[in-house]
Amino acid sequence: MATEAHAAEGATGYIIHHLTPLSVGNGFWTLHLDTLFFSVLLGGLFIWFFKTAAEKATSGVPGLAQNFVEMLIEFVDTQVKDSFHGHSKLIAPLALTIFCWIFLWNFMDLFPVDILPAIGSVMGLPYLRVVPSTDLNATFAMSISVFCLIIFYSIKIKGPWGFAKELLFQPFGPWLLPFNLLLKLVEEIAKPISLALRLFGNLYAGELIFILIALLPSYLQPVLSFPWAIFHILIITLQAFIFMVLTIVYLSMAHEHH
Amino acid sequence: MSINATLIGQMITFALLVWFTMKYIWPPLFDSLEERKKKIAEGLAAAERSQEEIRAAEERAKTVLKEAKEHSSELLSLAQKRANEIVEESKDTAKKDGERLIIAAKAQIEQEMQQVKESLRAEVATLALDAAEQILGAEIDKTRHQEIINNVSSRL
């Protein structure tokens, strides 16, 4: 794909250029450096901000940063308590990480589409795709991790036999065993795929629209990109929220006995 | 849009982030939240308690005030009663005194009347004697009464 992009010119070339990652390596061992760089950077930002707040955390009157962080903590905690009725040390921090990290990824979408790639090209980078959530690798990495946790907890809580029984004998009883298995497998595999593709699709499409607006005459751009950016603030938060809530729901399902 | 090794890098990053959040971020923040919640609850409870205490103190003050009022009104009525008694007593004494005085006066008047009557009687007797003398003096006729005189003188 990267090689095709070199050939294309004009509007198509512009779009393809914006959506091509900076990569090294060949075949499977290709690394998207921009995705890795920005997600690590944003993850570091998240960790740094929250760590600072956590270090200074008091039970007295909170400062501005602590207030903000506590608001997020309470928000995530409420979501977890609403859907998850077990006791787990992992789920709430996991949900917080997912929400904040995805939100920060998505937030990169609100930077004007040409600024960071322009800076990158000055620094000698031919391609720069700044929004990690427009990379399937990033979204799938997260959803597959969640999927692994779902499987892990299913087996841990229900036991290997309990989990196997759930796969084989539900929802139609032992007489329709192969059908049950097929249904359950589709259901389980659909979880990470839908998580990853929903996030990717929304952000990829959003970014594409920003790129298309950037192709229009300059006097038209603010009229269109301003409302789209406003709308996008909603979308990026919503997508982060949906990913988080679904993760909580899937994990609480994994904790439940049937 | 190929899936490649980036996926693995992202998964590692994600795992590290989650681990770090779980280990160093969530617990202190959550604990401080819980602690504040507890503090606020305690503060509210203390406020509630002091409110309760104020109410009790007011109640107590009201009782004390009521008692004092009752006591004072009791005292007042007692004093009133005593005053009435004193007035009654003095009225009685005055009445008796007056009666005694009246009796004494009456006795004196009686006595004086008696004296006046005595002296009047004496005077009336003298006056009667005087008048009788005068009447007797005028009535005596020497010729008519000479015989009587002579008679008396002859007996001598």
Image (tube, coloured by chain):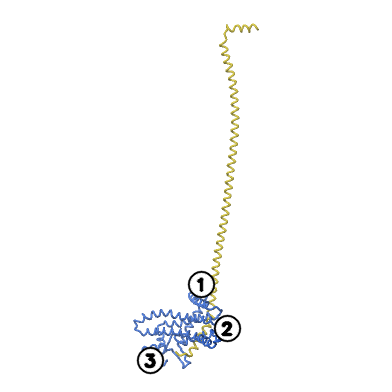
Chain colours: A blue, B yellow
Tag 3: amino acid: Ala
Depth check, mark 2 against mark 3: the one in front is: 2
B39 versus A151 height, above or below = above
Image mark count: 3
Distance in Å between CA atoms under marks 2 and 1: 44 Å
Quadrant containing the C terminus of chain A is bottom right
For the residues tagged 1 and 3, is the chain the same? yes
> Mark 2 belongs to which amino acid?
Lys
* SS under mark 3: loop
* Residue A222 figure quarter: bottom left
Q: Residues within 10 Å of mark 3 (few under 14, many from 20)?
A: some
Label 3 sits on residue:
A8
Q: Residue A145: tell me if it is visible.
A: no
Q: Mark 2 points at which residue?
A: A158
Q: Which residue lies furthest to the front in this view?
A: A175
Q: In this view, does A84 lie above or below B96?
A: below
When the figure is inspected, residue B73 is found, relative to residue A129, above or below; the finding is above
**Most foreground residue, B58 or A158:** A158
Question: Would you say A71 lies left or right of B140 here?
Answer: left
Instruction: Write the residue at 40% across / 92% down.
Output: A4
Q: Name the residue under label 1.
A: A61
Report the amino acid beneath label 1.
Val
CA gap between label 1 and label 3 equals 58 Å
Instruction: Kindly identify which numbered label has been placed on residue B75.
Output: none
Q: Which chain carries label 1?
A: A
